[in-house]
Image (cartoon, rainbow, N blue to C red):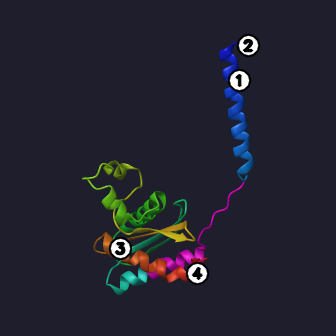
Amino acid sequence: MTRWNRMIALAALAAVTVLRGAAAEEPALVEFKFLSPGTALEMAKAALENCRSSGYQVAVSVVDRFGTPQVLLRDQFAGPHTPETARRKAWTAVSFRSDTVQMAEFSSATESRTALRFIDDALMVGGGVPVEAAGSIVAGIGVSGAPGGEADDVCARAGIAAIADKIAF
């Protein structure tokens, strides 16, 4: 066996040893926390009511931690674009693990990260907020239809506040 072949064999042996050690420490299954449908609905209703109390007709979307829709509510006079906009805001919040007010600033035309705005379904407009419990994202909420992303954000956060005691660990 040449020196080169011995080096390759030792490197392969080392890689297998490292991979075996990593696999032995890693559990075969992982667990995730999700909002129950009832809790997701309660949060969406609270956000909708908060917007209504300010005179806004909106749509509210709640997605699970992977961006799959759980709840969609649309007020009777909310624009036809608002359900999809709310869903995309919620999806963006969980996907980027950040609220969309921050994402709008982070990806503005003056920033080098402006390309983030071209990712399918990403919507860098205020009103999407990740929902966290014990440091993990369990859902996202998006609101669309208030006059501006900041007002949508206030309504979304009111929805989260309404269920905060239920998701506190």
Measure the C-alpha gap from mark 3 to mark 4: 23 Å
Q: Position of residue 80 (x, y in %)?
A: 36, 68
Q: Position of residue 30 (x, y in %)?
A: 68, 58
Please say whether residue 69 is visible from this viewpoint: yes
Indicate the amino acid at tag 3.
Answer: Asp
State the residue position of label 1.
9
Q: Position of residue 132 (x, y in %)?
A: 52, 70
Q: Residue at x 46, y 82 (%)?
A: 46
For the N terminus, give its image quadrant. top right
**Labels 1 and 4: the sequence-earlier one:** 1
Q: Position of residue 107 (x, y in %)?
A: 32, 55
State the residue position of label 3.
152
The quarter of the displayed image where residue 13 is located: top right
**Labels 3 and 4: the sequence-earlier one:** 3
State the residue position of label 2.
1
**Labels 2 and 4: the sequence-earlier one:** 2
Q: Residue at x 38, y 64 (%)?
A: 100
* Mark 3 crowd level (few <14, some 14–19, many ≥20, 10 Å Cα): many
